Image: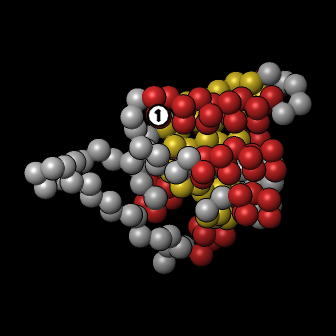
Amino acid sequence: GKACREPKSILPYDAEGVVKMSRRLVRIYADVENAVGMPPEILIEHVSECIGSPSNCLAFLAKRNRLALEGEWRESGFQVCIAGDGPDGADRRLITHIVHDIQLDSENGRPPGTIILVATGDRVYKDVLKVAERLGWHTIVIGWGSISKALQTAAHESVNLAAVTADG
């Protein structure tokens, strides 16, 4: 069987007791260079089945890796964000995007949902995961292989998708 938890069904009611069907945001931010070997379609399938239908799917990579990696992620429905080739360019762009999205959601009155970070070992994401958690977001790290202790402890949950799909 699949190793996933039951999706949470939170039914908010208005003053008359009518269910308001605004779904919770589920955002995927993929550090493509940090997820080498992960088939993006398997990621989307897992998230859809176990967490909820993704609201946004963003993949971040450096310009130098564009030819090798962009096509597969774009074909799977990801919006691909190209960063400069400097050290940690894609990482910084991904973090900036998460912070910007959280700010916009807050300004527009959207409640916190789920942030899924696709990475395995980059501890640079630890602080943004902790900030998101403090602001009410549920944080999940999904990797393709062993996930660093720093990321495991920074997020609410972590999933080694390679192991989960091997068992299923």
Residue at 71%, 58% (x, y): give it: 154
| Mark 1 residue type | Asp
Asked if one can make out residue 124 in the rendered structure from this viewpoint, the answer is: yes
Residue at 87%, 25% (x, y): give it: 86
Q: Is residue 51 above or below residue 66?
A: below
Q: Secondary structure at mark 1?
A: helix
Q: Quick check: 137 left or right of 125?
A: left
Q: Nearer the viewer, residue 126 or 51?
A: 126
Q: Residues within 10 Å of mark 1 (few under 14, many from 20)?
A: some
**Residue 164's spot in the image, x, y percent?**
60, 69
Query: Which quadrant of the structure image shows residue 157?
Result: bottom right
Q: Nearer the viewer, residue 20 or 159?
A: 20
Q: Quick check: 50 left or right of 72?
A: left
Residue at 80%, 59% (x, y): give it: 150
Q: Nearer the viewer, residue 109 or 45?
A: 109
- Residue placed under numbered mark 1 in the picture: 105
Q: Residue furthest right?
A: 87
Residue at 50%, 28% (x, y): give it: 104
Q: Residue furthest front?
A: 15
**Residue 67's spot in the image, x, y percent?**
73, 27
Quadrant of the frame with the C terminus: bottom right
**Residue 128's spot in the image, x, y percent?**
69, 44
Asked if one can make out residue 72 in the rendered structure from this viewpoint, the answer is: no
Q: Residue furthest left?
A: 16
Q: Is residue 30 above or below residue 5?
A: above
**Residue 55's spot in the image, x, y percent?**
43, 40
Q: Is residue 70 above or below residue 129?
A: above
Query: Which quadrant of the structure image shows residue 75?
Result: top right
